[in-house]
Image (cartoon, rainbow, N blue to C red):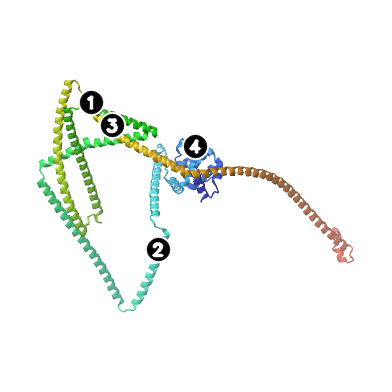
């Protein structure tokens, strides 16, 4: 969990989120803040998700996030597989739900961006079947599906072009370089034309040079055609040689073939295949099934301790002692008839083992033949030329002939060995039939003697006991190996646990000191936080008081300013009136008639008259 939180914090502090979190601040986030961070990450993947979750209903937020996470194929952890609990955890901003989502998203942001972009165009609209009965809607839906397929095709081509190594800047540079070369060539041609125009008969010389170039090109094409015809002739000769060799082999095989030999060969193949199908393959399949059953049984059993191993070893020793006791009893009842049956059983087991070994050799030979045929087909397909024909060079043909001669000698030897093995197989099969007949005869005699002695079924019981003892020994051997493996595994696990403990001891010691330091810092943080909050509350109250005082003083200042401007304006008006009164008095008492006419009193009196 700590590694998960550390990864989330590191990714959130990088581009494009640029958060300034640490493990403590991130772990102490409120549920709404966690949900907002999750929404920011989803908005980085799909820009449509960029909004403030405080402006949205919780049900709509959860529905939107669940739809996007489902589209991105997010699977909740095993303990949150229930959909209702997962949605409830999203609604409440539960950390065990949000943290795994953030960890999963931040691990694969580029991939999810691409998936969200493609989902906008590739997630098909669900149209009910009854609506598709309408022809217009059906045609529109088919056009929509064709557009989706076209988008898939174009997007695939775009991705191939992006990954092909081509760059538009490089192509532009190449085009500009080619244009520059073209301009240079045009200039050189112009210069050469100017130089040639001064030569006499330059038109005829240019025509002859043009004809010379055409003839050289024709010569090159004729040379190429000649080489192709040589290659085709060589290939035709090689095909002729192979066809002649095949015809020769087929004629030789036809001379040696007659109906009796073909029937005999087919009968032998049928017998071998029937033996493989009816006896060998079912035994191998049954053995594999038993092995798988035992392994599953061992895997499902709980882990064993030393006491369980000791108990199993005691049981094995007890079973071994019982088997030894039964063998001793059997040896004490030594019967000559049993000796004869033992001899026949040994011969039959030898024959069966030889038959199984020959069948395995035959199976290996068939597998080698199939591998050689596959290799031959692969080599033939690789050696196909441009026109679909095989191309074999001289040196390669020589090596192929030498290899074929070696293969031919090996094939003849193997064929001779197979013929000898088939003959020996026929002899062994006949011997097996004779031994089976003898065994049946002896078995009938034994049953008759057992009936006369009054111990019917004794031989069957003894055979069953031998079979059980053989199976018991095989099981004991497998159990012993299994117990050894389990004990070795237990030792390895114990040693690994000790190593891990020793490796973790200094880390745990350091972690304890860090935990203590973390507790001290947390306590100091709480104290500082309380001091900060009390100080902030006092400063806030002082600030509100000062703001009220400032507001009252500003209002009073505004009123004083208005009063000042009013008084100032009135004083200016009174001064103006005083000046006009002084001027009027001066004009009225003046001895000059013209000045007296300027007085307002004279003006008003004249207007009155």
> Residue 603: percent from the left, percent from the top?
84, 60
Image quadrant in which you'd find residue 444: top left
Please name which of the two marks, 2 or 3, marks the residue nearer to the observer. Answer: 3
State the SS at label 4.
Answer: helix
Name the residue that disc number 1 marks.
461
Name the residue that disc number 3 marks.
472
State the SS at label 1.
Answer: helix
Please name which of the two marks, 2 or 4, marks the residue nearer to the observer. Answer: 4
In primary-sequence order, the first of circles 1 and 4 is: 4
Distance from disc 2 to disc 4, alpha carbons, whole Å, reads 57 Å
In primary-sequence order, the first of circles 2 and 4 is: 4
User: Which residue sits at x=39%, y=70%?
Assistant: 184
State the SS at label 2.
Answer: helix
The reply to whether residue 302 is in sight is no
Q: Kindly check if marks 3 and 4 are in contact, taking CB atoms under 8 A apart as contact.
A: no
User: Which residue sits at x=11%, y=42%?
Assistant: 261
Name the residue that disc number 2 marks.
175
Please name which of the two marks, 1 or 4, marks the residue nearer to the observer. Answer: 1
Distance from disc 2 to disc 3, alpha carbons, whole Å, reads 83 Å
> Residue 60: percent from the left, percent from the top?
52, 39
Name the residue that disc number 4 marks.
87
């Amino acid at each position: 969990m700590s590694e998960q939180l550390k990864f989330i914090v590191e990714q959130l502090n990088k581009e494009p989120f640029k958060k300034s979190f640490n493990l403590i601040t991130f772990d102490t986030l409120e549920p709404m803040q966690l949900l907002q961070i999750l929404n920011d990450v989803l908005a980085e993947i799909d820009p449509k998700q960029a909004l403030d979750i405080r402006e949205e209903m919780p049900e709509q937020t959860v529905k939107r996030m669940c739809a996007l996470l489902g589209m991105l194929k997010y699977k909740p952890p095993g303990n949150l597989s229930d959909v209702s609990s997962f949605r409830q955890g999203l609604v409440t901003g539960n950390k065990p739900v949000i943290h795994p989502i953030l960890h999963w998203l931040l691990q694969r942001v580029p991939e999810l961006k691409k998936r969200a972009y493609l989902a906008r165009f590739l997630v098909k609209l669900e149209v009910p079947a009854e609506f598709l009965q309408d022809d217009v809607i059906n045609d529109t839906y088919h056009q929509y599906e064709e557009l989706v397929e076209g988008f898939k095709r174009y997007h695939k081509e775009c991705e191939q072009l992006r990954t092909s190594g081509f760059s538009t800047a490089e192509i532009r540079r190449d085009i500009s370089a080619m244009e520059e070369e073209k301009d240079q060539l045009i200039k050189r041609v112009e210069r050469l034309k100017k130089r040639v125009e001064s030569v006499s008969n330059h038109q005829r010389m240019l025509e002859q040079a043009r004809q010379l170039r055409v003839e050289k090109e024709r010569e090159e094409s004729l040379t190429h055609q000649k080489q192709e015809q040589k290659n085709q002739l060589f290939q035709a000769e090689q095909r002729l040689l192979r066809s002649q060799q095949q015809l020769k082999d087929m004629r030789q095989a036809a001379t040696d073939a007659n109906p009796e030999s073909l029937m005999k060969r087919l009968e032998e193949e049928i017998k071998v295949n029937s033996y493989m199908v009816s006896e060998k393959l079912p035994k191998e399949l049954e053995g594999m099934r038993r092995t798988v059953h035992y392994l599953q049984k061992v895997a499902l059993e709980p882990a064993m301790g030393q006491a369980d191993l000791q108990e199993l070893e005691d049981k094995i020793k007890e079973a071994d002692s019982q088997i030894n006791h039964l063998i001793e009893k059997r040896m004490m009842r030594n019967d000559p008839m049993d000796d004869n049956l033992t001899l026949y059983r040994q011969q039959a087991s030898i024959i069966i083992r030889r038959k199984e070994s020959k069948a395995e050799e035959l199976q290996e030979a068939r597998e080698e033949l199939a591998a050689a045929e596959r290799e031959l087909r692969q080599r033939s397909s690789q050696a196909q030329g441009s026109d679909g024909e095989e191309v074999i060079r001289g040196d390669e043909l020589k090596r192929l002939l030498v290899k074929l001669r070696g293969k031919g000698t090996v094939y003849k030897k193997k064929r001779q060995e197979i013929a000898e093995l088939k003959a020996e197989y026929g002899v062994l099969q006949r011997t097996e039939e004779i031994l089976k007949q003898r065994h049946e005869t002896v078995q009938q005699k034994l049953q008759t003697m057992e009936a006369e002695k009054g111990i019917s079924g004794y031989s069957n019981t003894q055979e069953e006991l031998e079979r059980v003892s053989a199976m018991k020994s095989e099981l004991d051997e497998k159990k012993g190996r299994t117990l050894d493996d389990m004990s070795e595994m237990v030792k390895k696990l114990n040693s690994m646990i000790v190593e891990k403990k020793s490796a973790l001891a200094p880390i745990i010691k350091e972690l304890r000191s860090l935990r203590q330091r973390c507790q001290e810092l947390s306590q100091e943080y709480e104290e500082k936080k309380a001091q900060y909050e009390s100080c902030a509350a006092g400063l806030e109250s002082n600030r509100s008081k000062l703001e009220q005082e400032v507001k009252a003083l500003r209002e009073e200042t505004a009123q004083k300013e208005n009063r000042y401007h009013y008084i100032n304006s009135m004083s200016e008006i009174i001064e103006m009136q005083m000046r006009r009164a002084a001027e009027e008095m001066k004009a009225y008492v003046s001895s000059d008639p013209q000045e007296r006419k300027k007085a307002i009193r004279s003006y008003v009196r004249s207007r009155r008259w």
